[in-house]
Amino acid sequence: NGTLVMSYTAAVASALVVAFGLATAIQKKFDAAKAKQLMKWVAFPSAVVASSLNCYIVRSPEIDSGIPLVDGNGEDVAPGQTSKIAARNGVNSTTVSRAILQAPVYFLPPVLMGTVPMFKNLLAKNPALSVPLTTYLVLVSFGLGLPSTVAIFPQMAEIDVKDCEEEFQGLSGKDGLPYKKYYYNKGL
C-alpha cells in the first residue's frame, strides 16, 4: 500500500509540476492567441511523466530484489539468485512502453474527429455529441494502444551473459556448454 500511495502522489505531483511549468512558460513566451493554441497540448507531456513515473515507482522494488534469469528452455539458471540488471532493464522497458501509450490516446481522437468526414459531419450537425464521441474514441485508442505498446518490447527479454552480474558469468547449461544469453520476464 505504501508503494501505491507514493507512486500515486509522485505521479500527480509530477503531472502538476509539468503542467504548471509548461503553462507558465507558454504564457510568458507567446502572445495570448498562440498561447491558447499551445495550452491544449500541455496535458500530453504531463500524462507521459505521470504514467512513466507511476510505473517506475510501482515496479522499482523489483530492481532492489532482482528477477530470476532462465535459459532458452525456461529453466532457472541459478536457482535462488536474481539479477538486478535484468530487473532494471525490464522496469525501464515497461516504463518506456507506458510513456508511448499516451500518444495514441492523446493524438488519435482529435485527428480522427478533425479529418474523418463521417465524424466531422456528425459533429457539425450535432455538436452535443463531441464529448461522447471523444470519450468513445479515447477508449478505443486506449484499447488498441495498450496491446500495441506492450508488444514493443518482447515479454521474454534476453540479456547477454557479459552484461549480467558476476554470479551469472561462466555458468553452463545441462549440455555442459556455457550460456551466451539469458532470458527474463520483463513484466507488464
Image: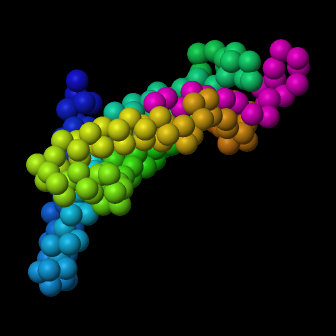
Name the spot of residue 59 as percent of width and height, x first.
39, 33
- Against 128, residue 172 (above or below) is above
In which quarter of the view is residue 51 placed?
A: top left
Range covered by the magenta-colored residues: 170-188
- Against 122, residue 8 (above or below) is above
- Against 119, residue 63 (above or below) is above
Nearer to me, 71 or 126: 126
Q: Is residue 57 left or right of residue 17?
A: right
Q: Is residue 183 magenta?
A: yes
Nearer to me, 118 or 63: 118
Q: Quadrant of the N terminus?
A: top left
Q: Is residue 61 visible?
A: yes
Q: Is residue 45 magenta?
A: no
- Which residue is depicted at the point 22% across and 28% down? 2
Q: Is residue 157 left or right of residue 55?
A: right
- Which residue is depicted at the point 39% across and 49% down? 104
Q: Is residue 187 left or right of residue 42?
A: right
In which quarter of the view is residue 21 placed?
A: bottom left
